[in-house]
Image (tube, rainbow, N blue to C red):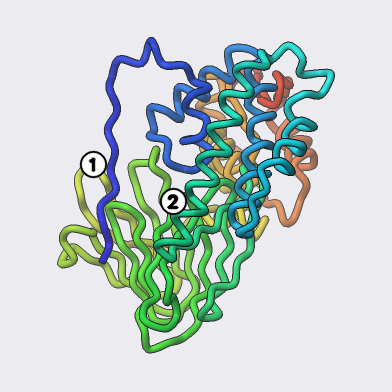
């Protein structure tokens, strides 16, 4: 059964140390407000960004160990020393690193033990790369960066239920057992088909784009609120007004993160940057003066530098690196 998984947070955040939120953010458990706090902390100082990157590497090390079922604390500490103590990061306070590192190790170890006891398995893509997974029933799943799925023992035998946080493309193997995705406030039910699901905690919509077969999208707590989606259709569930609707798929850029095909037709630059961030996994910031600029261009399997070169020449833009964030500025349109 699909369970609603909503979280709340105290609105008074002024005394919260953003580094203490890193384990939740890396595990996909962070609320939109917590994710925002960490993002603002990273943007405030290049040293904070360096600290974040060090912890991201550390998280990938420990999460890989817990997923494989082989956690050797001594070995993991040696690996972490090479990540958190390079010469260029000496400015990071060692005590803070050790505190966060210990919490990450503990979370990974506890998650591993919990999985062994409950039979729950988790698959998570790295923070800046895709991950391809073959489920026990033969279903192929491609996870977008930072996205995660979890499922219980017996998948493909007694059930085909899983939880999704983030974004994934599913190629579901045909089977008499329904394939059910819990995406939080909404669920997706199929038996064999291909489709994309976008379900981020900081987005107001859960979106399903079907490329083959038939998919049912419905509200978790009210299954009667549903939409039957065919190939070439997109369904959305609006978390604010709690409605399910469908329409013909007009924006194939929702699949760009997987297909690497970007097709813009008088597309406003803010939307272009959102798609680029979701496809290439790099933070971008756009000058408000460019909000009304639009572009018409198509890219197929192009490197990000090539995309930037075309956009710069088309709209007379200037791109400036600020840490790992890229600022896009220009005269406006």
In the picture, measured across the screen, residue 230 lies left or right of residue 146, that is left
Label whose residue precedes the other's in the sequence (2 or 1) = 2
Q: Position of residue 107 (x, y in %)?
A: 50, 41
Q: Residue furthest bottom?
A: 176
Q: How many marks?
A: 2
Is 162 above or below relative to 287?
below
Residue 333 in view: no
Marks 2 & 1, CB-CB < 8 Å contact: no
Residue drawn at (71%, 21%) of the image: 323
Q: Quadrant of residue 31?
A: top left
Residue drawn at (77%, 24%) of the image: 85
| 278 or 332, nearer to the observer | 278
Residue 288 in view: yes
- Which label sits on residue 240? 1
- Which label sits on residue 165? 2
Cα distance in 3D space between marks 2 and 1: 18 Å
| 192 or 161, nearer to the observer | 161
Question: Circle 2 — which element?
Answer: strand
């Amino acid at each position: 059964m699909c369970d609603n998984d909503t979280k709340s947070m105290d609105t008074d955040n002024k005394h919260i140390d953003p580094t203490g939120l890193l384990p939740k953010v890396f595990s996909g458990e962070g609320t939109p407000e917590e994710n925002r706090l960490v993002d603002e902390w990273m943007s405030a100082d290049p040293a904070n960004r360096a600290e974040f990157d060090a912890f991201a590497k550390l998280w990938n090390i420990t999460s890989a160990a817990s997923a494989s079922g082989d956690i050797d604390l001594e070995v993991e500490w040696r690996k972490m020393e090479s990540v958190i103590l390079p010469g260029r990061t000496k400015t990071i306070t060692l005590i803070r690193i050790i505190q966060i590192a210990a919490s990450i190790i503990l979370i990974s170890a506890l998650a591993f033990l919990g999985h062994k006891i409950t039979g729950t398995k988790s698959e998570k893509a790295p923070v800046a790369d895709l991950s391809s997974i073959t489920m026990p029933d033969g279903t192929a799943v491609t996870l977008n960066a930072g996205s995660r799925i979890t499922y219980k023992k017996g998948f493909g035998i007694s059930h085909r239920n899983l939880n999704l946080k983030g974004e994934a493309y599913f190629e579901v193997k045909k089977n008499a057992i329904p394939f059910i995705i819990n995406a939080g406030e909404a669920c997706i039910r199929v038996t064999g088909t291909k489709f994309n699901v976008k379900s981020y905690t900081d987005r107001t919509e859960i979106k399903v784009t079907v490329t083959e077969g038939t998919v049912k999208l419905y509200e978790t707590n009210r299954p009667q609120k549903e939409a039957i989606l065919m190939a070439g259709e997109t369904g959305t569930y609006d978390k604010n007004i709690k409605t399910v609707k469908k329409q013909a798929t007009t924006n194939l850029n929702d699949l760009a993160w997987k297909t690497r095909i970007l097709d813009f037709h008088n597309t406003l630059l803010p939307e272009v940057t959102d798609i680029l961030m979701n496809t290439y996994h790099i933070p971008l910031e756009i000058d408000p003066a460019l909000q009304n600029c639009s572009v018409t261009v198509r890219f197929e399997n192009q490197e990000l530098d090539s995309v930037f070169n075309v956009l710069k020449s088309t709209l007379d833009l200037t791109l400036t690196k600020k840490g790992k964030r890229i600022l896009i500025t220009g005269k406006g349109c």
